[in-house]
Structure formats: structure tokens, C-alpha cells
Image (spheres, helix red, strand yellow):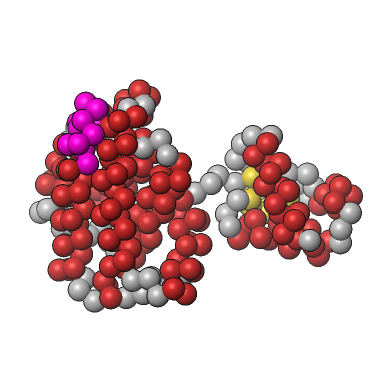
Amino acid sequence: MSEAIARDIVRRIGAEELAPGTQLPPEAKMLEEYRVGRGSLREALRILEVHGLISIKPGPRGGPTVDQVHTENFGRMATLYFQMDGVTFADLIEALIIMEPTLAALAAQRHDPQLVVEMTRFTRPARTDDEEYARDAADFHRLVAAMSGNPVMSLFGQSLNDIVRDRVSPPLFPKSRRPAVLNVHCDIARAIIDGDADRAEELMREHMAEYAAYVRRRHPGLMKEVVDWR
């Protein structure tokens, strides 16, 4: 019963295009609508909260509220299955090596005008201190995934990157290597802006292969570790 209620709430959020921050009906109204016990309704809401789809605020003016869909939540759920299936970080990074070049090629092919404007940000010099570098690197790969135009691949690509970033922290590359990484991002960004799918794919493949090689050198034990649920 709780799963059926949770599915119906998700359908309603999608059908009514409820924006993040929208408050759902109060508990009393939901109980009346679904004609179920308080335990079943609260379990349904808990299911959605655990998956990061809603947040529940306490207090008289609180209640269930539509949350922003974050790739981190999808990645967190995926790590549970990865751990149960014995997926290693080597498997995870191999998947990124395959997926990221495809995302870059699609980004160049589909060439969304609005997102192309955003991509120009990465053709300019960026700072290499820890916080700025980590944010710019993450933003670059998120934008490439978003520009692919395929929501499934974008979600998977961003989530896998989220998992790796959560485990490999602080930023992997030392400051001496960061300008070279940012230059590669710049070259990939220009290829995407120019609509050159072949070059964008090639550059991203080389970039990800270099990234994987560096992870193996700096964290040799990590590659054999099973991805743990976080």
C-alpha cells in the first residue's frame, strides 16, 4: 500500500509539473484522499524522502515538500547495488571512460544554443586553488552531460562522477597538473562549441584515459576496492 501511494505521489508531481519547494497536501488531507492508515502514508513519504524526491519539514507549517532532483541521490542509491554486486572502482572508472566521450560527442552534435553559451565559460582561464578547481572541474563534466540531450545518459554520467568525486577527495590532480587539465577542458569545450563531435569525443577519451592512469598511480589500492554504499 505504501509503495502504491508513493508511486501516485510521484505521478502527481510529474503530471502537475510541481517545482522544487512546492508543498504537498498536509497529512490530514492525504489520509482522507488515500483512505489509509497514518502508518502507510508516512511509510510512503519516507520512501520518497530516502530517495531524495521530497523533504519533510517538522512543525505546524511543515510537511512534505517537493525536493530538487539531485544526481548525488541517484548515485547514492546506485552505490548500494554496486556494493552488493561487488562493483570495483576500476569498473566504475572504466564505465566513465566509455560514457564520457559519448556524452561529449552528443553535446557537440546536438549543440543546444543556450547551453553552448554556458560552455564558453570553460574556454577562459580558471583558478587552480582546491575549491575553485574542484567546482570548475565538476561543473564542466556536468554541463557536458547535460548538453548530450539524453536525460538517461546524463543522469548516469553525472552520478558516476559524483561517486568518484565523493571517494577521491581532495581533488586528484596536484596544482602543478591542474593547468594542463583545464587546458584540455578548454579544448573539449571549443570542440563542442564548434560542433565538432569527432574531436570532442577523441579529446574526452584521451582526457578520461589520462585520468584513469593517474588514479591508478596515485591510488593503486582504490581500483581494487568495492564501491561502498554511502
Residue at 69 percent across and 34 percent down: it is 16
Query: Where does the image place residue 72, in percent across and percent down from the top left?
Result: 46, 54
Locate residue 134 relative to residue 202 in the image: left or right.
right
Residue placed furthest toward the top: 113
Q: Is residue 196 magenta?
A: yes
Residue 11: quadrant of the picture: top right
Badge count:
0
Locate residue 96 relative to residue 181 in the image: left or right.
right
Residue 25: quadrant of the picture: top right
Q: Is residue 121 visible?
A: no
Query: Where does the image place residue 230, in percent across and percent down from the top left?
Result: 46, 68
Residue at 21 percent across and 26 percent down: it is 194
Locate residue 180 relative to residue 2 in the image: left or right.
left
Task: Work out whether residue 162 or residue 204 is closer to the camera in this orientation and state it.
Answer: 204
Query: Where does the image place residue 52, in percent across and percent down from the top left?
Result: 57, 54
Residue 90: quadrant of the picture: bottom left
In this rendering, the answer to whether 23 lies above or below 109 is below
In this rendering, the answer to whether 212 lies above or below 206 is below
Secondary structure mostly taken by the magenta-highlighted segment of the chain: helix
Task: Work out whether residue 30 or residue 2 is closer to the camera in this orientation and state it.
Answer: 2
Residue at 31 percent across and 58 percent down: it is 95
Q: Which residues are magenta?
A: 190-201
Query: Where does the image place residue 182, in percent across and percent down from the top left?
Result: 18, 43
Residue at 45 percent across and 46 percent down: it is 152
The N terminus lies in quadrant: bottom right
Q: Is residue 49 visible?
A: yes
Q: Is residue 198 magenta?
A: yes
